[in-house]
Image (spheres, grey):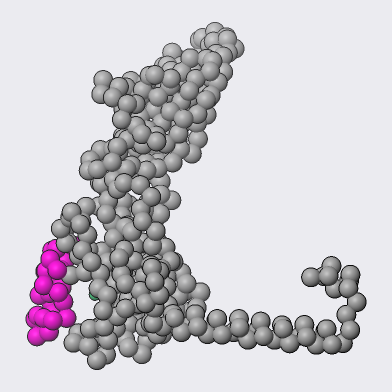
Amino acid sequence: MHLARTLFRTDRRERTTRRSRRRVVAVVAMALVLALVGAACKQLDPANRAVSVPGVTNGKLPLSYLASSSTGCVVYDEAITSYNAMVAAAARDGVKLRGIGCYRDYATQVTVRNDWCSRGQCDMAAVPGTSNHGWGKAVDFADQSGELTFDAAGYAWLKAWAGFYGWIHPAVMEPDGSIPEPWHWEWIGDGGKMFNGQYFGIGNAPLAEPRGMPFGSVDSVIPVANGVSVSGWAIDPDQVASIPVHVYVDSTGVAITADKSRPDVNAAFPLFAAAQHGFSTTVTATPGPHRVCIYAINVTGTGSNRQLACVDVVVPPTTPASVAVAPTTPATVPPTTAPPTTSTSTSTTAAPSPTIAPAAAPAQG
Ligand SMILES: [Zn+2]
């Protein structure tokens, strides 16, 4: 554009034409923006309701089907990305949305139903085993003023934008509906009907891999004298408890448990925060090059072992200097001071159990 302007001399008429063209472009752009804002208000079919999750029971979803927001709102795992994106977008607009009623297991559904029935309003809670909270696809929201009301800022924001994220306020829960509940919103990002074609909202991508695979991360693999130090964390999404991690130096495996404190991991995965998931150990290795592979072991439920990392290292040659140190202090230092260093390293190598061998085989990328 700049180049064109310097190359060609323009007379007043051409400039006027360009200006009016620009005005047309501006008007068209404005119309598009208005159309999008309009679409935001009515992109979802109000008849949508959350659908059941195939193969599992309402209120009894396995852990691996659930995910938690950083504030502890537990939802169906496929809904968590859009939930987080929606709450973050609201926060940018000054609306502090938070889920105050999220996934409800069967027992909690019974409690909630009994609570409403005791007030003579049974209809305000679903029959236990039928609630969309029991699929992890319904969230009761509050904003900075508390539980949403029909004139709350949070309700107005959600009415305008929730559809973009695949969330809807069911028609029956509108002010003129049979169960007016301004706080209750449902996720329909896995099959809801939109007015605008096949648009399922932001953050509603299907799961990238089968459920139940252990996951984690290797933070360091460092060759040291007579071994390799490794650290990281691992979680099996089918259980809260700490899981085994297998560290292979070439073809020799060592089993350890990822049960060391990692507050950062527990903060990131609140569903699993009742146990520890870090690991940090040194496994023995002879001087020279080695391949170190680390696997998170699938303990229960679906999924298989996951290879967290495979790293080539060179263990340094043993220094004769350390051997030479001992003779210099024979009299004063009792013999017990020397062994601990060696016994610590052997105690980690004592961990290998006969059950380790199968680990390498089932590990799939
Ligand atoms: Zn609800």
20 lies above or below 190: below
The reply, left or right, for residue 56 in relation to residue 247 is left
Please tell me in which quadrant of the rendered image residue 318 appears: top right
Query: Which segment is the magenta one?
Result: 105-130
The answer, for residue 147, to whether it is visible in the render is no
Question: What's the magenta bit mostly, secondary-structure-wise?
Answer: helix
The reply, left or right, for residue 325 in relation to residue 37 is right
Front in this rendered view, residue 329 or 144: 144
Horizontal and vertical percent for residue 59? 17, 61
Please state the total of marks drawn on the protein image. Answer: 0
229 lies above or below 88: above
The reply, left or right, for residue 249 in relation to residue 47 is right
67 lies above or below 260: below
Front in this rendered view, residue 27 or 241: 27
Horizontal and vertical percent for residue 235? 34, 44
Image quadrant in which the N terminus is located: bottom right
Magenta region includes residue 97: no
Horizontal and vertical percent for residue 319? 58, 13
> What's the residue at 36%, 61% (across, down)?
80
The answer, for residue 252, to whether it is visible in the render is yes
Front in this rendered view, residue 69 or 193: 193
Q: Ligand 1, what quadrant?
A: bottom left
> What's the residue at 20%, 57% (across, down)?
54
Please tell me in which quadrant of the rendered image residue 39 appears: bottom left
> What's the residue at 71%, 83% (across, down)?
22
Image quadrant in which the C terminus is located: top left
Magenta region includes residue 108: yes
Horizontal and vertical percent for residue 192? 30, 69
> What's the residue at 36%, 22% (across, down)?
253
4 lies above or below 219: below
Front in this rendered view, residue 328 or 267: 267
